Amino acid sequence: MHKFMCILTVILFGLFAKEIIAQNKDGEQLTMEAAVSRAIENNPKLKTLLKSIDARKAIKLQSGLMPNPELGVEAENIFGSNDFSGFKGGEMTASLSQEILLAGKISKREKVAEMDISLAEWDYEAKRLEVITDVRRAFTNGLTIKKLLEKNYELVKISEELIMNLRARVKAGRISPAEVSRAQIILNSLQIDIDKLKEDYDSAIFELVTLMNDTKIHFGTIDGELKKIDALPDYDSLLIKLDENPVLKRYESEYSKQKAVITYEESKAIPDLTVSAGYRRLNEINAITFIVGASIPLPIFDRNQGAVQEALIRLDQKTNEYEAVKNRLILRLNLLYNRLGTLLGISEKLNNESIPNAEEAFKIIKEGNLLGRFTILDVLDAQKTLFEIQNMYLNTQSNVSAVVVEIEGLTVNNIK
């Protein structure tokens, strides 16, 4: 269990090398690695789960303790009548008794507690993987919007330069002022798109800061590259890696715990022995005697058969739960895999066909404008179309990156 957790940690942080960087100065760039580290460090649910692990370790300590011995004191034949008045005929007994748990109950009880610790550790690993995936998804979204903003700012800058040239040509009387107005409409539309992207970027950053749970963090911008893959990974290999998901690995401990519970409940069919020893003082004859004793329940009616049967049923129940959880994860993997294949196809078509065609059209129209074949508005339209297709490609790459993040979160492996 602990060996696997170490391997899991290496794999996860192989996806994004762990670095704990204090980002408290305005203008600093926030990387995905730093965001993930902060989120893991500050997440209240993870802190709660760590406390749960510590609490279950304390429970294991308690489960390994033997019952305390009992001290008993008894006085007989006192404060009666005649010869038994006062303490004259009294008998005073002091004894020490100890319950001895048979059939290895203590070690078997410890095994159940140990499996509870393992389950708590898997709960922590599952939540940590969820936090990592959420941060990577939010970071990817913010990074995409940032790149779209940069692309649109570039287009606005070019459009503003063209409008300045148009106004100069209007003053020279070479074109109609209507050309400037039409170009200004396109520029205004671009600026509206930028305002919307700014709002989306602020929302993405707010989500990221919320996931990091750090109200004191300040940074100028986020920095990084979108996750890219060359080809669709092999589905069967992903399906095999799905078994490494902590939600599924947890059931190994679930089975072990339930088997330990069965063993422990079966051991309860064997009753425990209680032994005692002490001494008795006989006041009437001024003598002391020693006593010893032993008792054990007779397992005639209660042999803990109901609890054993329940434990067996619970084991079957865990098997059914495992199948249900695995089927749900397989369905999720199938949906993501199919979506990834579609997005990669769209990305390839945009990169190999749409963008080159749009670039060629823009080049022809731009050169034709110099010869008077096309208006400057045609140039702006062609340029805007090119940028829109480039934005579409960027959005598609972002969706590819987001799906890859989800699949890596399911399979706990890096897709190359």
Image: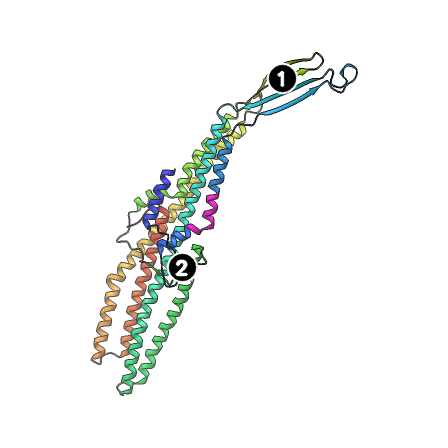
Q: Which residue is mark 1?
A: 279
Count how many numbered circles sit on residues in the image: 2
The residue sitting at 43% across, 60% down in the picture is 206
Q: Is residue 263 visible?
A: no
- Nearer the N terminus, badge 2 or badge 1? 2
Residue 341 point in image, percent of width and height = 31, 53
Using the numbered discs, state the Cα–Cα distance from disc 2 to disc 1 in whole angstroms. Answer: 74 Å
The residue sitting at 43% across, 41% down in the picture is 121
Q: Which residue is mark 2?
A: 24
- Is 48 magenta? The answer is yes
- Is 252 magenta? The answer is no
| Residue 34's disc number | none
> Dot 2 lies on which element?
loop
Residue 271 point in image, percent of width and height = 54, 23
Q: Is residue 310 left or right of residue 135?
A: right
Magenta stretch, overall SS: helix
The residue nearer to you, when weighing 56 against 163, is 56
Callout 1, which amino acid?
A: Tyr
Q: Is residue 16 left or right of residue 50?
A: left
> Dot 1 lies on which element?
strand
Q: Is residue 360 visible?
A: yes
Magenta range is: 41-51
The residue nearer to you, when weighing 43 against 258, is 43
Pointer 1 local density, CA inside 10 Å: few below 14, some 14–19, many at least 20: some
The residue nearer to you, when weighing 407 against 109, is 109
Residue 88 vertical placement versus 261 (above, below)? above
The residue nearer to you, when weighing 73 against 256, is 73
Query: Which quadrant: the N terminus?
Result: top left
The residue sitting at 48% across, 25% down in the picture is 104
Residue 27 vertical placement versus 134 (above, below)? below
